[in-house]
Amino acid sequence: MNIAVQSAQLGSVDADAIVVNLFQGTSEPAGATGAVDQALSGAISRLIATGDFTGKPNQTAVLYPSPDQQLKAPRVIVVGLGKRDDFTLDKVRQASAAAARRARDLGIKRLATIVHGAGTGSIDPSRAAQAVAEGTVLGLYRFDELKSRSTSAGGADEEDSTKKEIEQLIVVELEQAKLAEIEEGVKRGRHLAESQNFARTLVTRPGNLLPPVALAEETQKMADQVGLQFEALDSNQMERLGMGALLGVAAGSDQPARFIILEHNPPGSEGQQPVVLCGKGITFDTGGISLKPGEGMWQMKDDMGGGAAVIGALRSLALLGAPQRTVGLIPAVENMPSGKAIRPGDVLRAMDGQTIEIISTDAEGRLVLADALAYGQRYEPRAMLDVATLTGGVVTALGHGAAGVMANDPDVVERLKRAADATGERVWELPLWDDEYKRAIRSDIADMKNSVGRAASAIGGGMLLKQFAKQVPWAHVDIAGMAWTETDSPYKPKGATGYGVRLLAEYAAGYAG
Ligand code: BES
Ligand code: MN
Ligand code: ZN
């Protein structure tokens, strides 16, 4: 989809539909919506008066001007913004997505929209425009690369609907003074949302189509396109580095592991301490010898969701020309049971020399990330994050509402919370108190053990990773409840969410200057 910014009166815009908005409880539309209402001889006001449209969040209605009504577009889509008091940037993302999806259902090719929130919502025009672009691009996301139309089980209707695509979004603003800011916001929003969609596609691709080598190849292709430095270490190279924890997990699989390294080194950033982002890249998690139950196991293709978030974030930083030097480290491994697999009771030695007793081969994410964090030390990072679908425990604690954050440094947590406020990707802190929780990872025969059982299991994962962050300001982000959704919402269609892409990009960018 192409996105254009145009300075014009809404009525004169040449498009298949124009989108305007309404706050809940408004009886007389004002601003751009008011102007369109007038052109429609009060049709929007009547829509409200009948009670058919209240303006509740993401409600949509379609109106059809008559030829003499001074509107060039043949349709007007009205979208609800909810109550004025509850208005946030996220409502802009949602409303933009809801309107765009309604338009796509109608088969519309060229869609014009006002910048929700920039008028009477009094949000900064650049941020509002960014949210419009984000909501639209994210809301229209579909994964259709594996549907062959002739054999689709969905029947004729579904086949038709998958052909419908919006070709152009026209963002309309009358005030010349706001145009440059809106252009800038639209560009940011598009790069961020397209990068998030890239991550969604990686997560949705099943384990057989995206094993570690394929993930590395896809990442390299992307890196070449956007100008990121790329490297992927193979097993021999990892062996030489002493990455025994990662290689222990890899041992059970016939799919060779890769350690993916992405670097965003913007001009003038030489000598700058980078932000290092590590993402769990388990391309499929069977649990290994500690085999998972079969029911729902298919979803463990999303166990590289942290890695995909890091890859997507680096992509967007490159496209935006962000000034902060940033490194992405993705240990890409498949966790399988076999005669070569590690056993419960085995002890592995990580790259920094620390030893880990394996209690469960299903607690594999912390093992591959231990080596990633150890490798990350060589950059002398300003700060380091790891992002991972690490534990069922975090889903028990927070459900699908927020990622769990655990850290060794309050400033990192503060920055993450600020980034989350801006992007609408919620985080919630859990404690990593040494005096309370360190004993849980104590092992009788090694430096630590990899599983703590049911009590505080999310924190158990965080405590192990903390041993590898050492002196670097660090946070662990457990996204096990966030990488996938079974509920459809306007800009988060059912399936892979791409959670973390915008959060990590915003977080890293926060270190610039
Ligand atoms: N990938 C899983 C965690 C997971 C669970 C992600 C549910 C998404 C949804 C992880 O590797 C795992 O198996 N964790 C175990 C750890 C336990 C053995 C200490 C868990 O949480 O049950
Ligand atoms: Mn596991
Ligand atoms: Zn896992």
Image (spheres, rainbow, N blue to C red):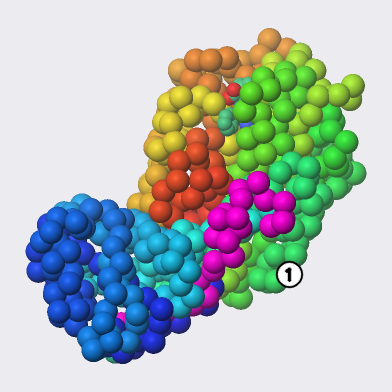
Measuring from the top left, give residue 80's x and y in whole percent. Answer: 25, 59
Whether residue 273 is visible: no
Q: Quadrant of residue 235?
A: top right
Residue 138: in magenta span = no
Q: Quadrant of residue 66?
A: bottom left
- Residue numbers of the magenta segment: 148-174
Direction from residue 109 to residue 74 in the image, left or right = left
Quadrant including the N terminus: bottom right
Measuring from the top left, give residue 133's x and y in whole percent. Answer: 43, 68
Nearest to the observer: residue 160 or residue 435: 160
Direction from residue 55 to residue 440 in the image, left or right = right
Nearest to the observer: residue 68 or residue 85: 68
Q: Quadrant of residue 318?
A: bottom right
Q: Residue furthest top?
A: 444
Residue depicted at x 70% and y 32%: 285
Measuring from the top left, give residue 252's x and y in whole percent. Answer: 84, 29
Split into quadrants, the picture shows ligand 1 in the one at top right
Q: Which residue is mark 1?
A: 224
Look at the picture and state if 431 lies above or below 70: above
Residue depicted at x 21% and y 64%: 22
Look at the picture and state if 264 lies above or below 14: above
Look at the picture and state if 328 lies above or below 175: above
Look at the picture and state if 377 lies above or below 320: above
Kind of residue indicated by mark 1: Asp
Whether residue 114 is visible: yes
Check disc 1 and report its element: helix, strand or loop: helix
